[in-house]
Image (tube, rainbow, N blue to C red):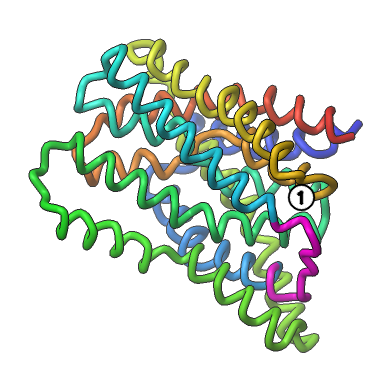
């Protein structure tokens, strides 16, 4: 029953978005606009509201943060080793690398809300507030390295810093943590307003993800996309599991972390690949394949957590 309650609504909204796009009720322009609304307005407000609503007592469970960060770094390193040994062409290397560890925040949040409630969402919000800057540094650095742009060390730093400073999710997480420590609650009118705005966020995000899925590039990039999905949905959860055990993480923090590891690849890898001279067709294939396969990985995590 936990699988039906947690995963079916997420899958249903993604499939609905895909069907509506195929029926030509929505188009590319609609999904671009909805993506911007979710990324720059609704989701940051939701993170700020969820994290800022009440101070979170960490006790001993803060160890899930370094465990998750180290897992991402290790899998990034393993993907670079794979790129070198296979070998993966430079034009595809950056897209492949991103697909191995970059995560879909929206799907993760939707499953978390259905499963672990307010405290789980707060733990997840603080986790992604730490991981998003780390992942951006890794992704941008590796994309520039393999992109052949000839950017010097100073330019690489400037580009990475620009992506971090402009990231509304990082800003929302930091603002939420500060607000929870200084205030810790919202006045009822503000709380009700943020609640209504947050209710728009995940349905619109999942609907947009479904509408953006395309299978056109999957066949020609299947083997490399499958390898990236394997790193993201098998290697990362296994490495993460070992590190959580090593760091002594348990309880809700353990469950939230494992669900984080089992999420599909972020749709943002397509945008970053197009901006930094990497293979967008491979990025699209990784997104589709990891999204489809992630329902198995998330199901396994939820069953183990039940």
Q: Position of residue 299 (x, y in %)?
A: 76, 27
Residue 139: which quarter of the image?
top left
At x 62% / y 55%, what residue is drawn? 127
Give the prevailing secondary structure in the magenta stretch: loop
Total marks in image = 1
Viewer-proximal residue, 132 or 67? 67
Residue closest to the far left: 150
| Magenta span of residues | 51-62
Q: Position of residue 46 (x, y in %)?
A: 64, 66
Tell me the crowding category of disc 1: few under 14, some 14 to 19, or many 20 or more residues within 10 angstroms, Cα based.
Answer: many
Quadrant location of the C terminus in the rendered image: top right
Q: Is residue 171 above or below residue 62?
A: below
Residue 56: which quarter of the image?
bottom right
Q: Secondary structure at mark 1?
A: helix
Residue 7: which quarter of the image?
top right
Q: Is residue 191 above or below residue 300?
A: below
Image position of 52 (left or right of 135): right
Can residue 24 be seen in this snapshot? no
Q: Position of residue 177 (x, y in %)?
A: 63, 74
At x 57% / y 67%, what residue is drawn? 173
Identify the residue under disc 1: 253
Quadrant location of the N terminus in the rendered image: top right
At x 84% / y 35%, what residue is drawn? 305
At x 62% / y 45%, what residue is drawn? 67
Can residue 133 be seen in this snapshot? yes
Is residue 305 covered in magenta?
no
Image position of 197 (left or right of 73): right
Q: Position of residue 132 (x, y in %)?
A: 48, 54
């Amino acid at each position: 029953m936990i699988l039906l309650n947690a995963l079916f609504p997420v899958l249903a909204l993604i499939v609905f978005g895909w069907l509506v796009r195929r029926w030509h009720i929505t188009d590319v322009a609609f999904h671009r606009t909805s993506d911007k609304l979710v990324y720059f307005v609704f989701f940051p407000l939701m993170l700020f509201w969820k994290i800022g609503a009440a101070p979170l007592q960490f006790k001993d469970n803060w160890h899930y943060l370094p465990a998750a960060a180290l897992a991402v770094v290790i899998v990034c390193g393993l993907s670079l080793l794979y790129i070198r040994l296979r070998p993966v062409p430079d034009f595809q290397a950056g897209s492949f690398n991103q697909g191995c560890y970059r995560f879909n925040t929206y799907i993760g949040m939707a499953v978390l809300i259905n499963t672990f409630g307010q405290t789980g969402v707060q733990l997840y919000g603080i986790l992604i507030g730490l991981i998003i800057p780390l992942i951006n540094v890794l992704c941008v650095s590796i994309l520039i390295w393999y992109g052949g742009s000839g950017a010097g060390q100073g330019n690489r730093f400037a580009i990475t810093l620009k992506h971090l400073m402009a990231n509304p999710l990082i800003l929302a997480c930091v603002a939420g943590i500060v607000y929870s420590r200084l205030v810790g609650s919202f006045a009822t009118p503000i709380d009700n307003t943020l609640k209504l705005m947050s209710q728009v966020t995940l349905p619109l995000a999942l609907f947009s993800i479904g509408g953006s899925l395309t299978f056109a590039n999957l066949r020609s990039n299947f083997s490399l996309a499958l390898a990236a999905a394997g790193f993201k949905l098998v290697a990362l959860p296994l490495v993460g599991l070992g590190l959580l055990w090593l760091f002594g993480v348990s309880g809700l923090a353990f469950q939230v972390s494992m669900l984080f590891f089992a999420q599909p690849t972020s749709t943002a890898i397509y945008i970053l690949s197009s901006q930094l001279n990497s293979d967008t067709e491979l990025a699209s294939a990784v997104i589709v394949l990891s999204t489809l396969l992630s329902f198995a990985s998330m199901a396994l995590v939820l069953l183990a957590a039940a």
